[in-house]
Amino acid sequence: MTCGVVVFPGSNCDHDALRAVERLSGKPAKRLWHKDHSLAGVDRVILPGGFSYGDYLRAGALARFSPIMDEVIRFANGGGPVFGICNGFQILCEAGLLPGVLTRNASLQFVCRDVHVRVESAASAATRGVAVGRVLRVPIAHADGNYTLQAEALKAVEDRGQVVFRYCDARGAAGPGANPNGSLDDIAGVRNPQGNVVGLMPHPERAVEALLGSTDGEPLLRAFLS
Amino acid sequence: MKARVYVTLKPGVLDPQGKAIESSLHSLGFGGVQEVRMGKYFELTLATADPKEAQAELGRMCEKLLANTVIESYRVELP
């Protein structure tokens, strides 16, 4: 298993992701440059957090046209596991690999704090083997995490069980105080119908060391790397 | 040829920025403002002089990049 982490201009969580992958897998991870035309033989791809292309136009809209994204799209369509975290999630939505779009937080504030999410589906590359209903404490840091879809498309996403994570409180209950950004149906992460592509706004790679307050990101990255 | 492109949120899509602007206008005394929806405006200079060709090309630009058609619609204006 070799995991690649794509570096876009403006990525700022690529090192966090590389470190987390290497710690958990015990194997070197591969840095992939946005201008590359090849995935260099990796069999897992992480799109990390950050502000690719300064979030110009829309978050993720310009990164989606980086040369490496053609390869990521081909890899994903062939069943390859792809994990988008925060800005990576936004890029996957803009690329059409995941449904929906992440818009400005309802509060209009950048929100940087720990939140709780509940695992809603074990049928994704990042939750295989993780118990549905499990509550994880993971940090968020974003201004554009407000998951939006038109009503019909949202219903399809819900009906197909594509919601993988929902914001909740520490006990796993939904509620207005538990949703940090106004996302429809408290959605924090979704998958494609096949489950090999998954994205979420919180940062599991920042929650893999007890020293930093939580290790709840570990099961997600372990599932993805296994 | 100069072209103008307007990208706006589809009806029913929440617009927190528009809402914030609306309440700022209210607090400035513009109480008659009933709703604000915020969008984007682009000016493009195109090499072609053929409006038909420009229209088709701008449509493709909007579909591919300028708008996210999941939540936004677009309108093109040519001189």
Image (cartoon, rainbow, N blue to C red):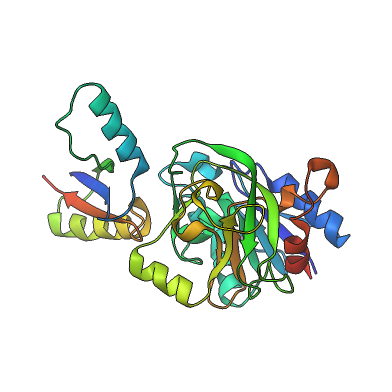
Q: Residue A41 at x, y = what percent?
A: 73, 68
Give the quadrant of residue A127: bottom right
Give the quadrant of residue A89: bottom right
Which quarter of the image is occupied by the C terminus of chain B?
top left
Q: In this view of the protein, can residue A158 be seen by the observer?
A: yes
Which quarter of the image is occupied by the N terminus of chain B?
top left
* Figure check: A120 above or below A172: below
Q: In this view of the protein, can residue A66 be seen by the observer?
A: no
Instruction: Name the outermost residue toward the left.
Output: B79
Instruction: Name the outermost residue toward the top.
Output: B28
Q: Residue A190 at x, y = what percent?
A: 55, 65
* Figure check: A211 above or below A203: above
Question: Which one is in front, B71 or A69?
Answer: B71
Name the residue rendered at 17%, 34% in the picture.
B33
* Figure check: A26 above or below A139: below
Name the residue rendered at 34%, 50% in the picture.
B14
Name the residue rendered at 35%, 38% in the picture.
B17
Question: Which one is in front, A31 or A187?
Answer: A187
Question: Which one is in front, A105 or A193?
Answer: A105
Q: Residue B20 at x, y = what percent?
A: 33, 34
Question: Which one is in front, A139 or A58?
Answer: A139
Q: Residue B53 at x, y = what percent?
A: 19, 59
Compared across the picture, whether A71 is left or right of B20 comes to right
Compared across the picture, whether A11 is left or right of B65 comes to right
Name the residue rendered at 83%, 55% in the picture.
A22
